[in-house]
Image: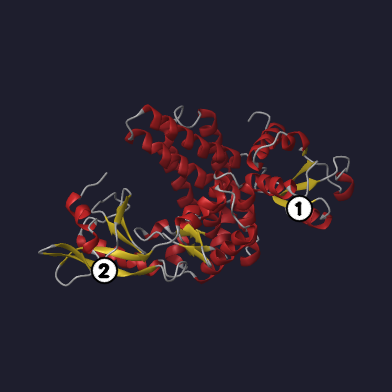
Amino acid sequence: MTGNPALVAGLLRPEAYPHRPRRVRLVETHISYVFLAGPYAYKVKKPVNFGFLDYSTLEKRRHFCEEEVRLNQALCPGTYLRVVPIVRTPTGLLVGGEGEPVEYAVLMRRLPVSRMLDRLVRRGRVDPEAVVRIARKVAAFHAASDHGPEIDRFGEPELIRFNWEENFAQTAPYIGRTIPRRWYEGIRRYVTGFLDTSAGLLLGRIGQGRIRDCHGDLRAESICVENGICIFDRIEFNDRFRYGDVAAEVAFLAMDLDALGRPDLGYLFAESYIEASGDRGLRRLLPFYQCYRAYVRGKVTSFRLDQVETDAERRRIRRVARRYFRLAWDYARAPAGPALMVLTGVSAESGPVLGRGLACRLGASFHPGGAVRAIRTDLEAGYPVVVTLADPEVRLEELVGVRPAVVIDCRAAVSVGGPPARALDRILRSVYARLDPAG
């Protein structure tokens, strides 16, 4: 992948840095080199032009380095320190030296990899309170972020429809490879139907000021939980990639947590954001935007099929892409209106995990069985509702006056053992079989 061996070789030398680290390690992506040097990281942009991203000249790279530092101050203060020049000297490249710059780098404080949210989720070490704090930080950031006519147009239904049609066109070559035709056509029908019937809802979001200059790439791997919350890697290379409905940004992290096997944390994040922001209308849009985010991840992963050489790598990519497309298909089958789904036979420990996880996947609200007034309120407002009950003999319709669409006794699914995500998958198969027998 390396395209500038002289630059890389020069910056892998410890003596190229003013603080003289003991060693330097390179992390490379398709758009940048990141040199890890002691307590600091130096991020150098590659001279590439992908159309949506243009780092082709030194001046453009300097500009986008400055933008990266500026844009990341709000969500990760104290990490993006400044832009430093890289100059050539008789003894080799020098970072921060005097002379004519041959390149620029973003100087960053290194964050502990072990405290990244995706790592914590995979290790089962996430404190739910940290997820609540992340939601509050994102809500406060959105409330203070820019909005206005130029940004508002990215919430218009026709632009959203255009983005979806582009996705469908770009994924058509992967039908039968990473996405089954049935999922492709089912998601397309869902998206078309939603956009045909929800123009008023989407336009209303513009009037409410919910279209904002967001982070643009809010994934678990871009969040560090360390003496506070640091959300980094805000998109700097293309403004339009940050502009959109805050619901789409919330859906991104909720989907990502779901993809990592913790949809219950995805639900907790979204509900905590709603509570912090007062954005009650966001819940109606979550399945739609979760579907969008999962579909895009499946698409981008599919593109890599044409870039790898080994069969083993192609099989791995197909598995990952298919997992994202399966999530998109699940979101597309969420109930479109009020529906009561009851999980019985759950414990005090398993109930919240399974209830929140199912609610995340179905775009529903979650309530324990005793919250009769809240259950009725959400059903009357048109939301699907997931309820958990410890006692399988309790007849919830007698309490709330509504016949459940689905009742699942979870004792068998939970007794099999394994992580909560595995039990949830078994329950989801039962729920979808009853909600959508053709699915």
Question: How far from the left and from the top, in percent, is residue 47?
Answer: 23, 54
The reply, left or right, for residue 72 in relation to residue 348 is left
Could you tell me which residue is drawn at 44 percent across and 33 percent down? Answer: 316
Q: Which mark is residue 367?
A: 1
Q: Residue furthest front?
A: 22
The reply, left or right, for residue 439 in relation to residue 385 is left
* Closer-to-camera residue (318/350): 350
Q: Residue furthest left?
A: 90
In the picture, which quadrant includes the N terminus? top left
Label 1 is placed on what type of residue? His
Q: Is residue 33 visible?
A: no
Question: How far from the left and from the top, in percent, is residue 77?
Answer: 44, 70
- Quadrant of the rendered image containing residue 201: bottom right
Lower sequence index among marks 2 and 1: 2
Q: CA distance from mark 2 to mark 1?
A: 52 Å
Residue mark closest to the camera, 2 vs 1? 2
- Quadrant of the rendered image containing residue 56: bottom left
Which residue matches tag 2?
84
Above or below residue 175? Residue 138 is: below
Q: Is residue 283 visible?
A: yes
**Which SS class for mark 1?**
strand
User: How many residues crowd mark 1 within 10 Å: few (<14), some (14–19), many (20+)?
Assistant: many
Label 2 is placed on what type of residue? Val
